[in-house]
Structure formats: C-alpha cells, structure tokens
Image (cartoon, grey):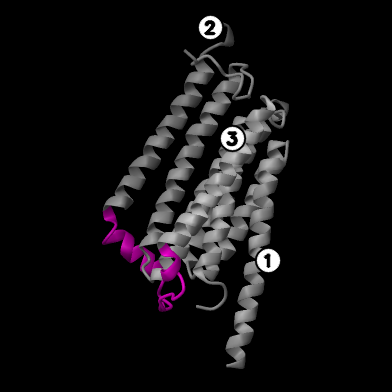
Amino acid sequence: MIVATAGNIVVWAVWVVAVFACLGSGIAVVSFSNPFFSALALIGNLGSLAVLYLLLSAEFVAAAQVLVYAGAVMVMFLFVIGYLGGQADAPWAGGPSWQTIGAIGAAASILVEIIVVVGIKAGGRLSNSHDVTTAFGSPDGIGRLFLTDHLLAFEITSIVLLVAAVGGVILGHHSRSLRPEEVEL
Amino acid sequence: MNGPGIAWYLAVSGFLFGTGVLGVLLRRSPLIILLSLEIMLNSANLTLIAVSRHYGHADGQIFALTVMAVAASEVVVGLGLIVAMARRDLVLDVDRLTTLRG
C-alpha cells in the first residue's frame, strides 16, 4: 500500500512537470518571433508529449513520436528555416487590433466549448478507467492490430505518404525550373 | 490507473488545442502557422491516446499513428510550398499573398 502511494506521487510529479513543459513550450512556439526558436520549442513540446504518452502506457506511440516527429519532421523544419535564412523572419502579427481580439476570443470560445461539451457528454464516464495488461500499447500489440483489424488504414497511410513524397518532389522541381523573370504575379 | 485521471489529460489537450488555434489565427508567417498546426494535431493525438487508455482499447493509438503519418505528409507539402514561394521572391507573409484573391 505504501509502495503504491509512493508510485502514485511519482506519477503525479512526472505528470505535472511534463504538462508544464508541454503548455509552456506550446505558448513559446506561438509567441517567439524567430521561427527557428519556435521550431526548437516545438521539439520540447513533442518530447514532453511523449512523456505523457508513456504515462498513458502508449510506449510504441511515444517512441514513434520521438523518432518520427522530433527526429525526422523537425529536422526537416529546421533545414527549411536555415535554408530561408533571414527571409524566414516575419513580423510578429499584423492586421488591425480587432483581428487580434477576435482571434483570442475564438481560441477562448473553442477551449470553453471543448471543456463544456466533454463535461456534459462524458462527465460521468470519465472516472473509472479500465485496467490494461502490460501488452497494451507495446510494439507487439500495435503491430498485431495494424496488420489485422486496421490493415486498410495501414495501406491508405502508405499511399498518403507516397503521394506526399511525389508532391514534394514536383513542388521542388517546378520551383527550380522556373526563372523568377518568367513568373507573372 | 496511477496518477491523474483521464479528465486532466483532456483538459491539457484542450489548452494545447487553444494555443494552436491562437497561433494559426494570430501569426502571419506561414512557417509558424505550420508549427501551430502541428500543436493542434498533437493535442488531438493526446486526446486519442488518453481515451484509448481509458477504455482499454488500443484502437485510438492506431488512429494516433495514422495522424502522425498524415502530419508528416502535410509538413512535406507545406514546406515545399514555402520553399517554392521563397524561390520566387514572394514575401513570406500570409496577409500579403493575395494573388489567388478574386
């Protein structure tokens, strides 16, 4: 019993640290004016989300998050920001001030709507979590689900990735073959 | 389940989604809009994984992995567009990209 309580405290402590890192770096992504620092903050955001996934016993998704997101996708982001150089720097925000106020109001109303709808529709059912075995979220279990029940999603995902790769190549090729003076804008 | 209950995770995910919405609506640099989109996708992933843990089915984790693949494709196309815009000497500012406006 004492061991269980101590474990509970450790889980809470890790959760609080990860959530603060997550929300803080999320706000940092939005508020930094230099895209390079925003991308670095997003890497911190993805890492702390991976910690939350581990607490939810989703080991494979947490590993994929670190490898695919914080590894591959963010390196691509940083390469593009480095390639653009000073051109990537943008003014913080623009437009009249009613746009800013409207944006903040829209974001706040979405947040309130999420909380109210979740509380009304699912408030009573959120208390008792099901127990899971250690196989839950393991690479074994995920792979078995992917290749049996969700085979169609697996195949569609591969087609989506192929289309995106072809699209990336075409976009890069066209923008290289056109000289700036040929483009009428 | 040790530690915080499912409602705490959903609250964190809601705040994260609100932050992403704020970034997409406020900022003008297309790069930062893409980064804020990633935050919104990740908050949806957190919801999927938390609810999947809550009900004890791993199907939500499959959905989260699929969302990750879609997000990677979206980043490839979005960054390709941004690089193409920069090569044509367009200003990287979504308020000033008005060529498609009717």
Residue at 56% in and 64% down = A52
Amino acid type assigned to the residue bearing label 1 in the image: Val
Q: Secondary structure at mark 2?
A: helix
Marks 3 and 2: same chain? no
Residue at 59% in and 25% down = B94
Amino acid type assigned to the residue bearing label 2 in the image: Glu
Residue A61, image x and y in percent? 47, 61
Mark 2 / mark 1, whichever is N-terminal:
1
Q: CA distance from mark 3 to mark 2?
A: 33 Å
Q: Is residue B32 magenta?
A: no
Which dot marks residue A182?
2
Is A122 or A42 nearer to us in this picture?
A122
Callout 2–callout 1 Cβ contact below 8 Å: no
Using the image, determine if residue A59 lies above or below residue B14: below
Q: CA distance from mark 1 to mark 3?
A: 28 Å
Residue B10, image x and y in percent? 52, 60
- Residue at the disc numbered 1: A17
Using the image, determine if residue A96 lies above or below residue B25: above
Which dot marks residue B25?
3
Tell me which segment is drawn in magenta: A122-151
Is B11 or A29 nearer to us in this picture?
B11
